[in-house]
Each structure stands twice: as C-alpha cells, then as structure tokens.
Amino acid sequence: MSACIGLWCVAGLLGIAAAGIVAGRWAVGTTLIYGASLVASLVGLAAALWHLLAGAAPETLSLALGLPGIGAIFRLDALAAFFLIVANLGGAVASLYAIGYGRHDTARLRVLPYFPAYLAGMNLVVLADDAFSFLVAWEFMSLSSWALVMANHRAPENARAGYVYLVMATCGTLALLLAFGLLAGPDGGYGFAAMRAHHPDTFTGALVLLLALAGAGSKAGLVPLHVWLPLAHPAAPSHVSALMSGVMTKIAIYGFIRIVFDLVGEPVWWSSLIVLAVAAITAVVGILYALMQNDLKRLLAYSTVENVGIIFIGLGLALAFRASHMDLPAALALTAALFHVFNHSLFKSLLFFGAGAVLTSTGERNMEHLGGLIHRMPKTAALFLVGCASISALPPLNGFVSEWLTFQAILVGPGLPQWGLRFMIPTVGALLALSAALAAACFVKAYGVAFLGRPRTPQAEGAQEVDRFSLAAMFILAGLCFIAGVLPGLFIDMLGPVVKDIVGARMPVQTFLPWASIVPIAETRSSYNGLLILLFLAVSGTLAAMFIHRYATRATRRSDIWDCGYPDPSVAAQYSSSSFAMPIRRVFGSTVFMVRETVDMPRPGEMRAAHFHVKVLDPAWRYVYGPLARAVMRTAVTFNQLQFLTIRSYLTLVFATLVLLLLVVAAWR
Amino acid sequence: MAMTFHIALELIGQAIQMLLVLAVAPLVLGITRKVKARLLRRIGPPLWQPYIDLWKLMHKEAVLAHNASWLYRAAPYLVFATTWVGAALVPTYATSLMFSWSADIIAIVALLATGRFALALAGMDVGTAFGGIGSSREMMIASLAEPAMLLVVFSVALIAGTTQLSTIAETFVHASIGLRVSLGLAMFAFVFVAIAENARIPIDNPATHLELTMVHEAMVLEYSGRHLAMIEAAAALKLVLYFSLLACLFVPFGMATTDKGLAALAIGFGSYLAKVFVLAVLLPVGETAVAKMRVFRYPIFLGGAFAASALAVFLLFVSRGF
C-alpha cells in the first residue's frame, strides 16, 4: 500500500517536472509547480509515516521496467520509510518556502522542471530494491541536482562548481557500481534480496564497505571527498541548497547504511576503525573550514560536512559494536546517528532558508557586508537563531540530544574487546567535543556578524522582512527542532523498528518514562530530560526576572555606545567575520590549512591604503586533487603523441595489440 | 498522605540546594577577593561586598545603546538561568535529590555552553570592537577547554561506570576507590579547565578593565544596571558550580547519600561549606603565584589539561587499577 503510494508520488513528481517545462513560461507557474510539489511530498510523507508508525511489514513491488529479466524492484521497509520521511519532509518544506522565494527567480525555466524531478530522484533511491534501479535513481538525483546547481550558469564560479560536482558524482557512482558488482558475485544477482541472502566473505565485505564509504561518502561529503560540496551547495538557489545539504547528504547516508548494514551483513572490526577515523577527521576539519568562511551559504555547506562526520561517527560506532555482537550499544549508536540525520535535516534546511531570506532581501551572501539584520528582519532573525542554537548542540534543543546519545555510545566503547578500538574511541570522543565547541564558535560568528551589530553596507541597512511562505516554512522547521529537543523520546521510539530491522535490537521504549526523560541504557548510568531542563530554565529565568522587576529599578536609558569611553562611529570598527575567526585560525589553522596572512602596512606618511590578505588552503586540494589532476594531465600529454602518428605506425600498433591479446588468450587457457 | 509528604520533602531538598548555591555564590567571590587582597598586603573589601555590589547594580539605571536588540536584554536572564539550573543539578550537600537525574554531567556542561553562546552573541549585539574581541576569544577558549573536559568526564565515567553525578559521588563515597593516578591526572586537568572557564588568572583577569588581554570583561563591557547584576551573579554561580563539581567528582566525602537523616544532612551541609571555603581560599593563592598569560599561550595551558586527561583515560584502558 504505502510503497505503491510512494511510487505514485514519484510518478506525480515526474509529471509535475514535465509540466514545469510549460508552466515555467509564466510567473504564476512557480506557485503552481511548487504547490503541486508540496502536495506530492506531503502525500509521500503521510504514506511513509503511516508505514513506520503502524509497524507495517516490508512491501515489495516489481515493475516491468529496467533490465530485461529482472525488471525494477521496489521495496519499502522501516529504514526506507524513515529516509522517505526525511526526504519528503524536507521536500515539502522546501516547496512551501519556494512558493515565496521562487518569485524572485529570474531563470524560472532553469529551476522549475528540475526541482520536482530532483525530489522524485531522491524518493526513488530510497525505494529501489535492485542495484540497477538504485544506480539509475542515484544518477538521476545527481544529474537533476547538477542542473539546479547550474541554474545560474553565467557566473564563472557556478560553472566550475558544476564541473567539479559532475566529476565527483561520476566517480562516486563508479565506486558504488563496483560495490554492487562485488556484492552480486559471479552469478550476477542484482536484486537486493539476492545480495542479502548471499553473504560475502570477510575480504569482499571489507572491500565493499570501503567502496561504499567512497561512493556514498563522496555524495555525503566525507573528507577528503568533500571538495565539491562547498562549491555546489551554495551555487544552487537557496531552497535547493537546503535540499542538497539537508536531504541529499542523508540519501547518501541511506545508501551507505543500506549497503553496509543491510546487504553486506557481519562487518569486520577493523573496518569500523577506518570509518571512525574518517568520520572524526571530517567532523573537525569540516567545522574548522566553516569557521574560515565569510560567505554565509558556504559556511553552512562546510558545517554540513561536519555534521556528516558526526553521523558517520555514530555509524562507525554501530559497526564496531555490531562486529563484537554487542547489540544494545549498536542499537544506541545507530539510533544516535539516525536521530542526528533527522535533526540535521531540520536545522540545516532552516539555516539555508534563513540564508536565502537574507540573500533575497539584501542581495548579499558575504557576511562582511551584512550586520544589524535583527532589527530589519526580526522574524527571520529569531528563527535563524533557533537553527544556530540547535546546530551548536545546545540544550534544550534537538542537536544536543543526538550528540548526547553519540557520547553515551562512546562511553560504552571501553567494553569492546579490540585494543585498537578502545584507544580510538576516546580520541573520537574528544574530537567530537572539539567539533561541537567549534560549531558553537562558528555559529556565534555567523549570527553575530550577519544579524547583530551595526549594518555594514547600505544593502544591509535597507533589508526588509521576507514573505509569509518563507517565514512559515522556517517556523515549521524551528518548531520541529524545539519539539525534537524537548520530547526526544517520541522520535527515538519512532526509530525503534528501523534500528531493530538493521542490528536486531533497539533502544528501550522511551515514551512512557516519567517526565518524558530519555534513558539510553539504565537510569543509574545516564539520563537526560529536555522537557524538565526547559521547564527549569523557564522557571528560573522567570523567577529572576520577577525578582528584578520587583526589587530593582526599572529605569532604562537609551544612549550612545560606550565602548570603554572610546566609541568609534565607523561601522568598520566592528568585529568582522575574519577577525572573529582569527584566534581559532591562529591556533588550529596554521597547521591544518597552512593559513598565510599577509599584511601590507604603508609607512607613516605614505598615502596608499593598507591591505590585509588571508589565504586559506584546503589540504585536500593541495595534497589529493592537485597531484591527481597533474598526473592525469601528464598522462594525457604523454599519450597525446599517439594522435600524430603515420598510418604505418597505427597499423603496427593495431597488429601488436592483436598479437598481444592472442598471447594473453593463449596463456589464459 | 505519606506519599505527598515524601514528595514535599524531596521538593524541599531540591529547593534548598537551589537556594544554597545562590546564597553562597557572592560570599565565595567575597572570600576569594579578600584572600587575594590580604596576599597582596591590602585590607581588601569586606566579605559581603559582592552582595552589596549586586544590590547597588540592581538599583542603578540600565543604560542601553540605541541599537541594542531584544537579544541583548534577554541574554543576562538566559545566562543566569542556565548557570543557576546547572548549579542546582550538581550534588552539593546530598546526592540523588529529586531532579538530579534530569541532566548528567555532559548535559550540565552543555547547559553552561548555552549560557556562553547567549553571552557571546550579546557581546556582538551592539557592534563594538571590545564586544567582538571578547566573544571571539571566549569561544576560542571554550573550544580548547571542551575536549579536555570531555576526557575528564570519560575517565571518571570509566571508574564509576556512569555519567550521572549522583551515582558517581555515591560510588566514590562507598566503594573503596582509593588514591588513583588517573583520578589525580583528571583532577589536574579539571582544575585547568575550571580556571579557563571561570575567566581566572592566568587565562583572564576578572578584576580588570581596559586591558588588551581581557576576555570575559570585554564581552560584557556594554552592560550596566540590573543586566550587569544578572551577569555578575551568573559569574559567581558558575564559580560555585565548578567548585561543587570539583567537590562532587574528586572529594565527595561527607555528602549525605543513602542515609538522609538530619544528622547526615547536617554533616553534608557542613562538609560542603568547608570544601567550598577551602577551594575559595586556594584559588586566590594560586592566582597570586602566577602571571596572566598572553592569548596565544592559552593553547599550551589547555593543551596541558588535554594531555593530562587523555593520559588518565589511556591509563585506565591499560588497567582499571590505575
């Protein structure tokens, strides 16, 4: 039933995409297309929610499409239902936002047809149950999002972003193709059911895991495969950026979970070591990059890299526990990862919507040109603040709960028998704490520079509040962040069947615990109660305010800035984005990023302007992609000589190849 | 009937804890200032001076910059609330109070991070260079201190098998844990972290204005009147919170645990006050012995804390006996 509805939604979205080609000619088309996408996503969301909450059995559907003899198989189980919820919730909210935001779009025909197609692609990846349809859907998702990245193709940096994205997506799919090839084995059973039944040996299993880590990881943004992400995500229109960061990275994580946890089966313990190392580095490096950015959307894209790292830390822990048959801790770690998947899809979409609102109203993405928006866009500012606090893992909001669960899983780590893991896991824990603290610094910077302070440019000075659709979309997401933080038990229980399907155990039922607290293992061990914390904060804040208003004077005077007696009227005297990041750049950046600061200060009496220039290098470009590109270039140049040979040489070459092949065949037999 | 009476008693126990930390906080500050003054051969202000200061600030008019937003006015209350709730959840005179399970040590540390987040934003609200410098440095220090703090939590949790503060304290009181290298290292790291988090010398100087190296004071420079009173009270509470945490994690002796009789509670009360007094005397002694550090030497200071706590954790992996 639900699977059927899901497929109809995909068909509907494809139909809307086709209609978009026509409707894009008129301005009213945006409302129609986005409205229709909203409805289709809501139907898909309802079907997936129903499937998950009713605890329905997995459903399989087979359509006569795709490869002859196999057809296209689709399946909806608890894991797929959960990711459908994430995808369709994101899709629905993005459509709602776009009804307002899309009006400002200048190139409607470059966005409207691809947006529903992109939603359809993401739904299809989750529903696919054979390697062929999975890969086709995956590529469809990549290409439709590529088209959206190229929506504003005249900007040279967007063209570059599109190119890098295309190359990375192709390489990622290649890795997945190889992984499926290994899983299918010599008999070529490309259906997921056949792969599930046939367990690969340890070596093949580990190889598949590494290929899936590369393939899905390049889409999700694991370091060092993340380089396309901060280029491509900000280049797209903001509602698409939200989908790419908030949802598509999650679809990639779905691919990893499906392949590694579901299809491969039992993992070897040292493979989790690799996942954990990559994940922890991703988390820290991602947020450090984010801190160095001045472009608001690029900062958000880098912070996605960090959050993907946090999710993969949970997945790596789940792999480690699963390899040692510790089912309950594995369930805890996987729940933490999936909960963070859900949470991140909420607050990252919210933040990208906020950045989009700022972009619409000021035309600026560079934070150094913003400031003081809290006065001009009060509602957007308040909602963006909720997103910032959530992503910085602050109680009582939702980001904290999933990170807290991850920490609880880390604290079970010493129970593992392997020495390598026992030393690795506390290190990962410390790096996770570091990334959480840096995330707080990063979002204080983002909010403080863009929304607080004094406006730095006339554009920021003249900003206006955005339309109601955009505000409604942001409000829904902020509300969900709040609910997921205060009543996390509900969401953890929702994840119960998903986790049980995958690792064979689930976290204890949380919903009926007193005061809606969450207890991951046992009450003597640890518990957290978001509701009570919120209540306490409200009560003590109110008590303090009441006390002050009863016993203190209420006299308030507005005056000029004091600034210790030396106020500087120039808005340039405020702390800017790069000056805020300076201490952290000094402490962490000089080794990790090889930051170069050049100061050009004119001598007294010289009349030219002073210059300060910061250059942040991405080691991934320098050490991985630079040499790679040079090697490709060198090979190409070497083989280029083959283009200018005489006909005799070509014939000789052909003859030599033929003889060589015959020799190989002879030797083979 | 007995049930309601029991709940009422438990509520009272929790309320006493909330009021206790609030009442003690300015006094602790007064003690540290007095001891410091005596060590510098000054008379120093009387012990109750912080109470008077708070009262005075509450009755001064609050001056706001023209462009101060609602966030600037709300932040002091939020900072105060988070610190107060955090301090009320750390066991002081007795364990397992009514709501002690609603947050474990990780959540309490995160609650303080919420307050810091609000204050750092408030520092940037008016758009001055001093506010920005304070916020930026405060966040940098936090990012250095937090990993070390987590490893301290990790090492304590490895011994006690829990992150619940009440259970940790009970384990340490009842089970014969003895003197341990790992706990010593963890305590060393914790003290470093606490100094950094509370903006004390050598990281920051709470008694200064207009010094280029100041952090916390720069962040709250624009505040005045009742808002400043809230922030000062929160700062005092935070110091008490860290004292209580130190007492609870490393010297929980005397705390009323399973026996909640009047005598046990009295012992718990007395020993808590004694512990806080000792710590309030030790802090200025340490502070007068060292000089304030340059900003870019903080990583070395906090890196030392990180190394010590990491060593504690790794020692515990080699053997739980360390």
Image: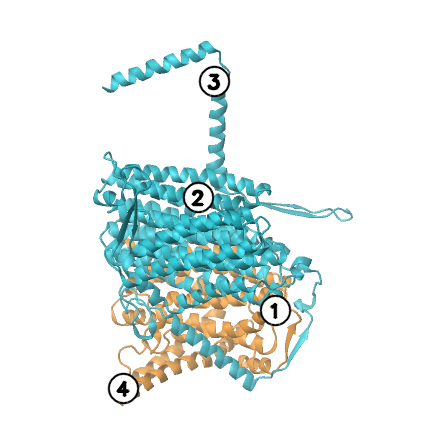
Chain colours: A cyan, B orange
Provide the residue designation for mark 4: B3
Q: Nearer the viewer, mark 2 or mark 4?
A: 2
* Direction from residue A435 to residue A107 in the image, left or right: right
- Location of residue A506 by image quarter: bottom left
Q: Distance between the residues labelled 3 and 1?
A: 72 Å
Provide the residue designation for mark 2: A142
Would residue B315 be visible to someone looking at this image? no
* Direction from residue A608 to residue A554 in the image, left or right: left
User: Which residue is outermost to the top?
Assistant: A648
Q: Which chain carries label 1?
A: B
Tell me the amino acid under the disc marked 3: Leu
In the image, residue B284 above or below residue A577? below
Residue sitting nearer the eye, A280 or A350: A350
Tell me the amino acid under the disc marked 2: Ser
Residues indicated by labels 1 and 2 sit on the same polypeptide chain: no
Provide the residue designation for mark 1: B221
x and y percentages locating residue A294 in the rendered image:
58, 52
Report crowding for label 4: few under 14, some 14 to 19, many 20 or more residues within 10 A (C-alpha). Answer: few
Q: Mark 3 lies on which chain?
A: A
x and y percentages locating residue B48 in the rendered image:
52, 82
Q: How far apart are marks 4 and 1 (CA)?
A: 50 Å
Provide the residue designation for mark 3: A642
